[in-house]
Image: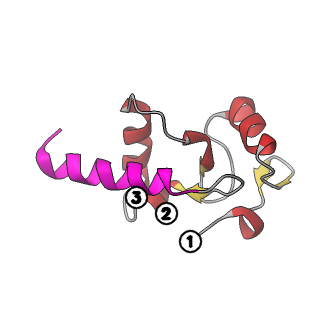
C-alpha cells in the first residue's frame, strides 16, 4: 500500500480497536465514505483486532454464525438475524 493508504488503514484499525465489548460499529463508521476499504483492511491485517464488532450498516453480519456467536458472548442484542443497531451501535 502507498503511504497515504497506510495512514488510512491505521486510522481504520484504531477505530476498530476503540469499539468496546458489547457494542458494534458499521464498516462506514470505521471508514467514513469508504466502507469497503474497512473490509479490505480487515481482510488483510495480521493484527489481532476485534473484527467481529464491525457489521454492515443494516446490522447484518459479514461472517455469519461465527461472528454472531462472538457478539452474543459479549451481550450484543439481536433482532432476528441482525444486530439491533439502535441498542448496540456506537457513533
Q: Earlier in the sequence, mark 1 or mark 3?
A: 3
Helix or strand or loop: what does disc 1 sit on?
A: loop
Residue 74's spot in the image, x, y percent? Answer: 76, 46
Q: Quadrant of residue 90?
A: bottom right
- Name which residue lies at 37% across and 64% down: 33
Q: Which mark is residue 91?
A: 1
Q: In the rendered view, how is the structure colored?
A: secondary structure
Q: Mark 3 points at which residue?
A: 31
Q: Name the residue located 61 percent from the left edge and 39 percent from the top edge.
A: 62
Q: What segment carries the magenta color?
A: 1-19
Discs 3, 2 touching: Cβ within 8 Å? yes
> Mark number for residue 29?
2
Image x and y of residue 51, in percent: 55, 41
From the viewer's perspective, is 55 left or right of 32? right
Report the quarter where the C terminus lies. Answer: bottom right
> Alpha carbon of mark 2 to alpha carbon of mark 1: how far?
7 Å
Amino acid at each position: 500500500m502507498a503511504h497515504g493508504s497506510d495512514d488510512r488503514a491505521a486510522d481504520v484499525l484504531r477505530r476498530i480497536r476503540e469499539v468496546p465489548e458489547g457494542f458494534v460499529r458499521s464498516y462506514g463508521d470505521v471508514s467514513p465514505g469508504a466502507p469497503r476499504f474497512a473490509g479490505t483492511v480487515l481482510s488483510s491485517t495480521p493484527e489481532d483486532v476485534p473484527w467481529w464488532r464491525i457489521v454492515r450498516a443494516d446490522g447484518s453480519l459479514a461472517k455469519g454464525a461465527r461472528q454472531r456467536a462472538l457478539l452474543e458472548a459479549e451481550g450484543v442484542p439481536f433482532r432476528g438475524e441482525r444486530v439491533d443497531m439502535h441498542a448496540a451501535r456506537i457513533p
